[in-house]
Image (cartoon, rainbow, N blue to C red):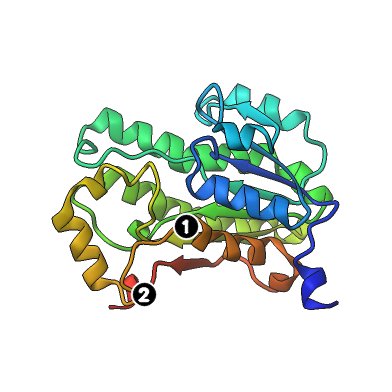
Amino acid sequence: MSAAAKFDFSGARIIVIGASRGGIGAAIARAFQDAGGTVEITGAEPECLPEDAARFPYTQLDVTDTDAVESFAKSRGELDVLVNCAAITKRGEEMDPEFFQHVLNVNLVGSMRCAKALQGALAKRQGRVINIASMYARFGSPQNPAYGASKAGVEQMTKSLAIAWAPDGVRVNAIAPGFIVTEQSARARQDPTFTDAIEARTPLGRWGQPDDIAGLALFMGSDASQFMTGVCVPVDGGYSVV
């Protein structure tokens, strides 16, 4: 099979959970569609961005609502790629136990809900799950303890599902983005001391863009990665190697 054919998603069905606000989820959805895939997206908001509403079928979906997730999954008979990108964080506010629990419910349990609900659809196509973890899965964060804990859980969940679902031919991998320019990181980027420190430590000398994540997602969703499962790959401009 040629390299071009491996990244041709014509006829493939892709769902990106958590892509309503632009950012990483939307960038991944656009990349799969540009590669020929049939893509639909979800988000917590009533509507997605206008530019994406013109491109994708959109479903408002609360990933903390098991019944809603299962209902959504029932009408998706076969699936080639599931991307779990739904996540929340509030820098400096995550020490509150109730909010801490809510963050885990969205970021970690929500990813598990969606993966489990769509397991049958993925098995029919020997599909791929791509979970979005974070560099905070491996670094402590005094301002984002719930987010970090949830993403560490996503990385571990990825390993466990990779083993459990391998007999069905379903591969499960994860991406750990570094500091990316998104709406979610906007609050942190208001602190010039913080942003300057990030750029100074990052070997590539900049914050990442959502499109920097999309290429690896295409690879993980393609046959080019057919002997790869259970791994979490950092995309952080070299931040984690310093």
The reply to whether dot 2 and dot 1 touch (C-beta < 8 Å) is no
* Placement of 105 over or under 153, stated as above or below: above
The one of 23 and 54 positioned closer to us in this rendering: 54
On the image, the x and y values in percent for residue 230 come to 58, 65
Please tell me whether mark 2 sits on a helix, a strand or a loop: loop
Q: Say whether disc 2 or disc 1 marks the residue closer to the N-terminus.
A: 1
Q: Local crowd at mark 1 within 10 Å, few (<14), some, or many (≥20)?
A: some
Where, by quadrant of the figure, is residue 92 drawn?
top left
User: Is residue 143 rendered to the left or right of residue 153?
Assistant: left
Q: Is residue 42 visible?
A: no
Q: Local crowd at mark 2 within 10 Å, few (<14), some, or many (≥20)?
A: some
Where, by quadrant of the figure, is residue 107 drawn?
top left
On the image, the x and y values in percent for residue 181 come to 38, 52
Please, what is the three-letter code of the amino acid marked with disc 1? Gln
Please, what is the three-letter code of the amino acid marked with disc 2? Gly
Look at 69% across and 38% down and name the residue there. 55
Distance between mark 2 and mark 1 Cα atoms: 22 Å
Give the residue pinned by disc 1: 156
- Residue placed farthest to the left in the image? 193
The one of 216 and 211 positioned closer to us in this rendering: 211
On the image, the x and y values in percent for residue 126 come to 79, 56
Look at 59% across and 64% down and name the residue there. 215
Residue 37's disc is none
Look at 73% across and 70% down and name the residue there. 226
Give the residue pinned by disc 2: 238
Where, by quadrant of the figure, is residue 227 drawn?
bottom right
Instruction: Tell which tag, 2 or 1, sits nearer the viewer.
Output: 2
Name the quarter where the N terminus is drawn.
bottom right
